[in-house]
Amino acid sequence: MSTNIDHIKEDHHHQPSGLMRWITTTNHKDIGSLYLWFSLLMFFIGGFMALIIRAELFQPGLQLVVPGFFNQMTTMHALIMIFGALMPAFVGLANWQLPMMIGAPDMALPRLNNWSFWILPFAFAMLISTLFFESGGPAAGWTLYPPLSLQGGNSMPFVIFSLHLLGASSILGAINVIATILNMRAPGMTLMKMPIFVWTWLITAFLLIAAMPVLAGAITMLLTDRFYGTSFFTAAGGGDPVLFQHIFWFFGHPEVYILILPAFGIISTIIPAFSRKKLFGYDSMVYATASIALLSFIVWAHHMFTVGMPLAGEIFFMFTTMLIAVPTGVKVFNWVATMWKGSMTFETPMLFSLAFIILFTIGGFSGLMLAITPADFQYHDTYFVVAHFHYVLVPGAIFAVIAAVYYWLPKWTGKMYNETLGKIHFWMTTIFVNITFFPMHFVGLAGMPRRIPDYAVQFTDFNMIASIGAFGFGLSQLLFVYILFQTLRQPVTAADKSWEGAEGLEWTLPSPAPYHSFDTPPKVD
């Protein structure tokens, strides 16, 4: 074994430098960094599209863009934020942290790891290039519902191929995560001794492998409908557009949990660290995560209450959707119980984690409102839905990613960020998130439909507030980029254990973490 390790060390004395280092790297930290920088870039591209949407909606009437381009922006914004910003961010965090948390030298399949990243830039280049087509980009909404997706311009085959590549990248990443966690844990680290972040990623990886092929199937059927004369979803040929919705949401709802389970893992890591207590109810957290993952496959049709399902179907999906609130509630309870009587301090990662708990819970409750079938007939396709899922995804997933970056940055770089600037970034972000998305609940309840470039004059005031909030939120993230670059320019000063209450194997390593995390596996008691 030692000769093997020596060989690995020897191998890396001659590693390429400059650009080739990043293109050919098989090191989990390098690939983690690539994923995180890529996700930041996509976050700003997707964010810019959101600002075009919000600028158009500042006042009623058509202001800046034509309706067709507006629809392209709503479609691309969602695809880029989900597949380009959030998923790569969590995979980047997994790449960085999993080997260090389980006491492994690297990921189990390093070359596959490199490949799963380098698929992404090409996939997104193809997706974004459709905006420059004569017929424009995809404008059917991110859900790609037929018949709209079958009637559009020439962009659809490119969008579908791009999504296939993204799905392939996700599945390869998931296989790597599972192989690493199941085979490379340090001696003594049983499954029930793993950090909760590792658990959430193990379950997420299984979700990815189960859900992504379903999306691949659905969009391939779209492709054959468009070019090969099949009629899966074309009503004129005996097909059913609602069938697409069923297949899409069978992927789409587990996808929501793919975006939030790693976030739960991050919050379950940060809350104990700054409460200086062990996580309350570790076992129940693991079981709750697994329950959410299993339940996510039997709730999909709550997105489709208005399509004309049988009453029994509507009641079934209503109850299963409400049932998923139970394990989520267990998690929130455990986080609060962890903080109870803890010696809490409020550094930036903790502040983002607290905001996560409060605002994610608001998003969860509006989700329960949408789960009630007769009420959903009123809420469906209004801005209330937009408010709901943005409260889950922005203060949920994005806040968790930002909290994780602040929490682990000293370990990654050996440098400490500016705490005062971090707190200013937190307060600006939190205030503007609420200014942006809270008014949407009201315009939604008053009946404003989503995905429209123009609206009735009575909704003007709330839309103005939301648009101001969106621009404020966007500008606040420039401060985040400034903090990152300012931190990177500093000398190495961070302690090996940067946070007093931090637990786990990664804090036994020096800061910055060495190229290969553990040459000899640590023993876990």
Image: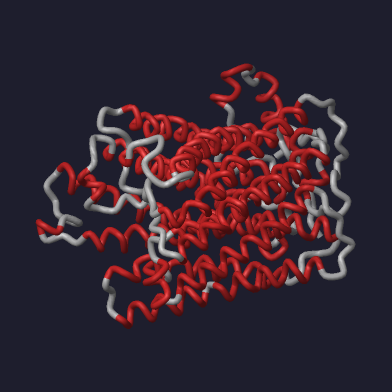
Q: Residue at x 37, y 53 (%)?
A: 213
Where, quadrant-wise, is the C terminus in this rendering?
Answer: bottom right
In which quadrant is the N terminus drawn? top right
Side of 265 where 449 appears, left or right? left
Q: Residue at x 14, y 59 (%)?
A: 235
Front residue of 272 and 61? 61
Residue at 64% from the left image edge and 17% from the top image edge:
17
| Rendered view: 13 above or below 462 | above
Residue 32 lies, in percent from the top left, at: 62, 37
The quarter of the picture where residue 155 lies is top left
Asked if residue 189 is positioned above or below residue 316 in the image, the reply reads above
> In front: 217, or 130?
130
Q: Position of residue 521 (x, y in %)?
A: 75, 46
On the image, the x and y values in percent for residue 270 come to 75, 55
Does the image show residue 134?
A: yes
Where residue 277 appears, as percent x and y from the top left, is: 84, 63
Q: Is residue 57 left or right of residue 516?
A: left
Residue displayed at 23% across by 45% down: 223
Closest to the observer: 265 or 171? 265
Q: Is residue 67 left or right of residue 396?
A: left
